[in-house]
Image (cartoon, grey):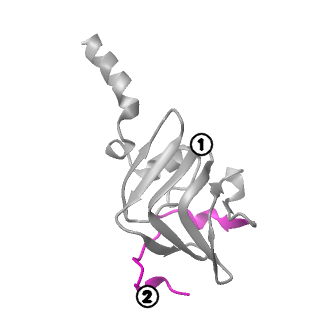
Amino acid sequence: MSLFLLLALLILPFISPSSQSSIRNLLEARGLPGGLFPDNVESYSLDVKTGELEVQLQNPCFARFENRVYFDSVIKANLSYGGLVGLQGLTQEELFLWLPVKGIAVNDSSSGLVLFDIGVAHKQISRSLFEDPPVCYPPGKSKCVA
């Protein structure tokens, strides 16, 4: 019995957390709002040793927080407490330009703000916009325009 338990504990960190809990629960456990990723998350994996997070969506899509955002079908980042660093696969529209989001952070949970690093600037967005996953529309759908 104890050998089985030991094997289970050794294998458990390598099992995809999507089978154990949702991406929402993972983000909230790491001090981030649960609604950062859209409603069409298919699966995700997390390397618990390196913090490398990979989120797979059913399809690439547009959503809206404060501005329009575009999610590739795969989003990658390094997940740490309060932040997603080295983000790939997410862009945000700013003044008619699409800029890559390089990171997302919650530096002070009492501030009620989420910080988006878009390279040329840091944008503060109300945490309340991320309580629920945004509805995501495939390219060509008009629900998420302007």
Say which element carries label 1: strand
Q: Quadrant location of the N terminus? A: top left
Residue sitting nearer the eye, 20 or 99: 99
Residue kind at label 1, given as amino acid type: Ser
Give the farthest residue toward the left. 1
Mark 2 nearby-residue class (10 Å; few <14, some 14–19, many ≥20): few
Residue 19, image x, y percentages = 32, 44
Judge whether 8 appears above or below 57 on screen: above
Residue at x 48%, y 35% (from the top left corner): 48
Which disc is residue 80 wearing? 1
Question: In the shown orientation, is residue 30 left or right of residue 16?
Answer: right
Residue kind at label 2, given as amino acid type: Ser
Residue at x 59%, y 47% (from the top left corner): 31
Q: Is residue 76 magenta?
A: no
Range of residues picked out in magenta:
122-146
Residue 67, image x, y percentages = 60, 77
Say which element carries label 2: helix
Which disc is residue 142 wearing? 2
State which quadrant residue 4 falls in: top left
Question: In the shown orientation, is residue 99 left or right of residue 16?
Answer: right
State which quadrant residue 30 falls in: top right
Label 1 or label 2, whichever comes before in sequence order = 1
Judge whether 5 appears above or below 17 on screen: above
Residue 78, image x, y percentages = 57, 46
Q: Quadrant location of the C terminus? A: bottom right
Question: In the shown orientation, is residue 47 left or right of residue 128?
Answer: left
